[in-house]
Image (cartoon, grey):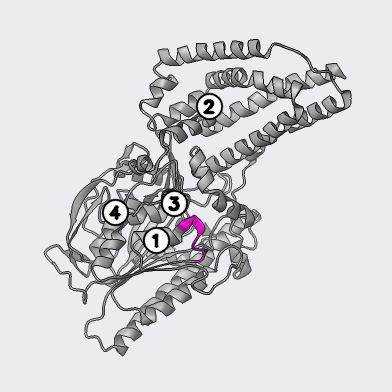
Amino acid sequence: MELAFYVVLIVFLLVNVIKITFFNLIITGQRKFTFFLYKFAFTLIITLWFKLYLVLCFPVGMAIYYILEVLFLYIGVSYFNFYHYFLHLRQSLRLLRESLELVRYKSVPRSFNQLLALIDLPFMIALLVLNYLGRLPVIRFNLAALFFACMLLVLIFELGHALRGKSILQLVKTYPQSEQKVVANYGTLINMLLDFCLFFNKEKVISQFDYGRPKKIKSREITGSEIDLSYKSNKPDINPNIIAIQVESLDANSVNLHFQDSPVMPYLDSLKNTSIYFPYMMNYHKAGGTSDAEFSIINSVEPLSKYPSIKLTGYNNPNSFVKILAANGYRTAVFHGNKGSYYQRHKAFASMGFAEFYDLKKMGLRHVGWGAPDHEVFAFMLKEMKEQVEPFFYYLITMSNHCRFTNVLNYYWDKRFDSIKNKELKLYFNSLSYVDTTIHSFVRKVNSLLEEKNKREELKSARKTYILIFGDHTPGLKKKIYREATLEIENRHLEFVPFYILSPERIVYQETAKAASFLDIGPTILDLARIDTFFTTYGESLMPPHKLSNKIPYRDYWFDREQLYQRIKREIT
């Protein structure tokens, strides 16, 4: 019995260390065998002494530790699969409620590598059973000697790091820019603790925002296919209405999908030739998940990598373009088919300058699946538009197309996709079809509503209305099922979504050389609103004619727009 126990113990320790090593390989993107050997040896040295102590002297404690380790690795891999970055302590605490909501509505993306956390479970169970059945005597050994031996080996490793300029003391000086090196050398737990200690107050967290440079936004008259650069006016009777639609899980490749020689999204596909269309807009999908979309768009700033920016306590969104619109006579409102407390949007949107936030409760809607159906949210917004004083700015965030794409089954099915064998792909195509149909219906109704309203009010010159449509992030599907619009450059994971502007002048333009970014939406909306103002941003207006000369920032790297466009186009076409 004792021999079997110690054989299983050795196997468990080896498999456990291999598990942690592979976890580090996944999140660092390293594939070199030398890195595997380094991480294996370093992990073994760091963890050997206390795991031996727990197994031999405190088996109940070992069971508790193992459960925590499994949860840590599972959550870490799950987070990395979707956000392609490392989880942080404050972030995980602040997003606990949102995470539980995702689990409740079965909206967590699944992947085979999540099972990595359990590969040593049979050996762990065997250890506990053998220990209980055999009633093994406690083996006395010099724990202090083992501990100091392990620490001596750690110091030797650290000396090697120092000689290469990568010791923990050297990396701290350039943190958080050196974060990836910290994770590669010391793992995610050390990185979590380091981040927690170095960024312990909101002032230090907020100081990481880089808004860019102040630039002058000049009002311009838009007629036909051209813009009059000499036009200037801030008169409220000519400022147009603007509607922004942020579509859940709509990436740049989804609008190109075809099934049986027909587009999956025929309406959005047709808009490529009837609107201002940017096929590749780089989005921000970081520590704040989906909320990073509206945060980065409205503030025209790159969100934080380690903390959900929208949940920063006391942050007053000083660069919000919504405040500029409101100060210039715009009535502002945001609509979302989820609870307002999710991501604390009810607090954030008020701070951003929105006069109204219509969430699930305020609209009088209910969950069908997870969240209210998009068509019901659109219908509510149309009802508000009928009585809305103009000009107005409406921002709508859809929800029906959320991963795992089962929400739509409660109220829509497109029989075109019955023959698709892969369940996930079938659900995604059906969900995209619903989104396309719903947006098309909404646009038609908006145009009809505004025509009726103008006739009723006998306006000589109807107020113009612009509709912006864009995705928030990629859908999180497996590579073998769907090719997401993503790039891996300079150890950074970049995502791309489509962007459309439907103009009353019926301007048709398709960008064929440069990528846009979420930072460009704010300047574009202020440009459309015809407001003379200064706005701090690295973004640029996307209304033609444009230059789009600024590079796009992402995690301390600046990406060239032309290179991004050519690279993503080559990857997904």
Q: Is residue 320 magenta?
A: no
- Residue 31 numbered mark, or none: 2
Residue bearing the label numbered 3: 311
Q: Earlier in the sequence, mark 2 or mark 3?
A: 2
Q: Is residue 338 magenta?
A: yes
* Mark whose residue sits in front, 2 or 3: 3
Q: Quadrant of the N terminus?
A: top right
Q: Earlier in the sequence, mark 1 or mark 4?
A: 4
Label 1, label 4: how far apart the Cα atoms are: 13 Å
Q: Residue at x 60, y 52 (%)?
A: 100
Q: Earlier in the sequence, mark 3 or mark 1?
A: 3
Q: Secondary structure at mark 1?
A: helix
CB contact under 8 Å: marks 4 and 2: no
Amino acid residing under circle 4: Asn
- Residue 319 numbered mark, or none: 4
Label 4, label 2: how far apart the Cα atoms are: 41 Å
Label 3, label 1: how far apart the Cα atoms are: 11 Å
CB contact under 8 Å: marks 2 and 1: no
Amino acid residing under circle 1: Phe
- Residues packed near mark 4 inside 10 Å, few (<14), some (14 to 19) or many (20 plus): some
- Residues packed near mark 3 inside 10 Å, few (<14), some (14 to 19) or many (20 plus): some
CB contact under 8 Å: marks 1 and 4: no
Amino acid residing under circle 3: Lys
- State whether residue 102 is above or below residue 560: below
Q: Which residues are magenta?
A: 337-344
Q: Secondary structure at mark 3?
A: helix
- Residues packed near mark 2 inside 10 Å, few (<14), some (14 to 19) or many (20 plus): few
Front position in the image: 72 or 382: 72
The image shows residue 366 at horizontal and vertical percentages of 57, 70
The image shows residue 7 at horizontal and vertical percentages of 79, 18
Q: Earlier in the sequence, mark 4 or mark 2?
A: 2
- State whether residue 390 is above or below residue 473: below
